[in-house]
Amino acid sequence: MASRKNRSRKANRKSPQLPPGPGERLRSRVDALFAWFYARRWVGIAAAALLLFGASLVGGYWLAERLEGSDGERLARETLEEMKRGPTTAPAPGPKYARIEELPDLPKYTEVEPGKPRPTLEEKARPKVQLAAAASSVETWRRNAVPFRDLNSKPLVAIVIDDVGLDRPRSKRAWELPGPLTLSFLPYAKDLREQAKAAGARGHELMLHLPMEPNGRNDPGPNALLVSLNDAELRQRTTAALDSFDGFAGVNNHMGSRFTTFKPGMETVLRQLKGRGLMFLDSRTSAQSVGDQLAQEMRVPSIVRHVFLDDEETLDAVRRKLTEAEAIARRQGFVVAIGHPHEATLQALGEWLPGAQGKGLALAPATAVLRKRNGWE
């Protein structure tokens, strides 16, 4: 009996606890680590989100820079290659510049009685308001303008001679013509300041002939404004040209049949002119030029070319163009005719200028046309 009880007591005793094995210890640590992370799960989630967001910003900025750089380099390469190749097809025969018939929104020209010009479509559509720039008491274009009083008694004819300064003998012949004429000097001409001073002393108005990129292979000269240049380079080249001499009332484009259709580049140029109080004459070497319209939107005083005198460099052709200019002046009250110091042009002007007043016309500087076009005194 006693021995049976003793065996029962031994059976009821708990067996001694053995130390945990390696597997149990690993499970215990994993459970503890999981419990720690679970307790702090929101902190972990927030940290991971911040880390991913930062990585996306850095990666996106790096990728954008690479793409932008590659696109800019590709565009520059394509533009340079296109300029080297030139036009893929031979240009159609025709005048060097856009003809008057190709320019939109210009009226048809008919003869009327001298001294009684009818209002043009342009004058009917344009509200006669003072531009902010023109309201300034001191403006460069006004300060450098050749004085001209009577805007309304006769139709005004502004003869602008471009490309002045390169061929010095013919340039001298141009400023020795009776005027007032408007002489537009290229910024890379030699003895530029001396030539401009001599022309101004003869009573002619001065302009800067700013080189701009044309269509095709014609060379506009050094430091021309190109569509492939960035904004900083365009500003630098424009500033250098504007600083080449002084005393001029405004700027017109030399060539530029491609650049004047390039709105961002023209905005850069016109901002420079506005800051200096200068006027802009759109030579309209392209019917798609945005120069004059953009100048009006930006409140830069501006006018446009109506006739090219010497697309065809013969005496008879220039005479016919002068007759066309007379008709336009009588039709709308003013005309801007652009020529160059070519032999035929100089000879035709030498014949025509002395008799202009007798035909009921008034020779006028470009700034007088600007004032009449906008109704400014």
Image (spheres, rainbow, N blue to C red):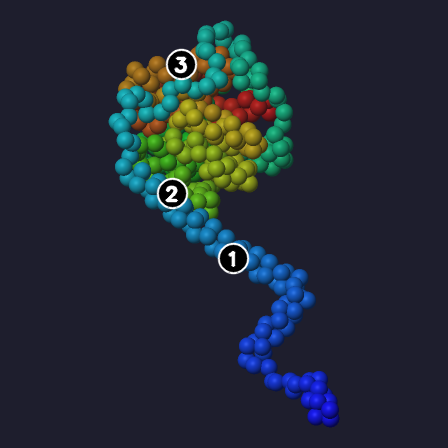
Label 2's element?
A: helix
> Does residue 342 lie above or below 229 as drawn?
above
User: Taking the image as drawn, is residue 188 in sight?
Assistant: no
Residue 35 is situated, as x and y percent measured from the top left of the image, at 65, 69
The amino acid type, in three-letter code, at marker 2 is: Leu
* Neighbour tally class for label 2: few under 14, some 14-19, many 20 plus, Cα within 10 Å: few
Horizontal and vertical percent position of residue 273: 51, 38
x, y percentage for residue 251? 46, 34
Q: CA distance from mark 2 to mark 3?
A: 43 Å
Give the quarter of the figure containing the N terminus. Answer: bottom right
Q: Kindly identify which residue carries mark 1.
A: 58
Farthest residue, direction front: 1
Look at the picture and state if 208 lies above or below 45: above
Of 341 and 119, the residue lying toward us: 119
Quarter of the figure with the C terminus: top right
Q: Secondary structure at mark 1?
A: helix
In the image, residue 5 above or below residue 204: below
Q: Which mark is residue 324?
A: 3
Q: Earlier in the sequence, mark 1 or mark 2?
A: 1
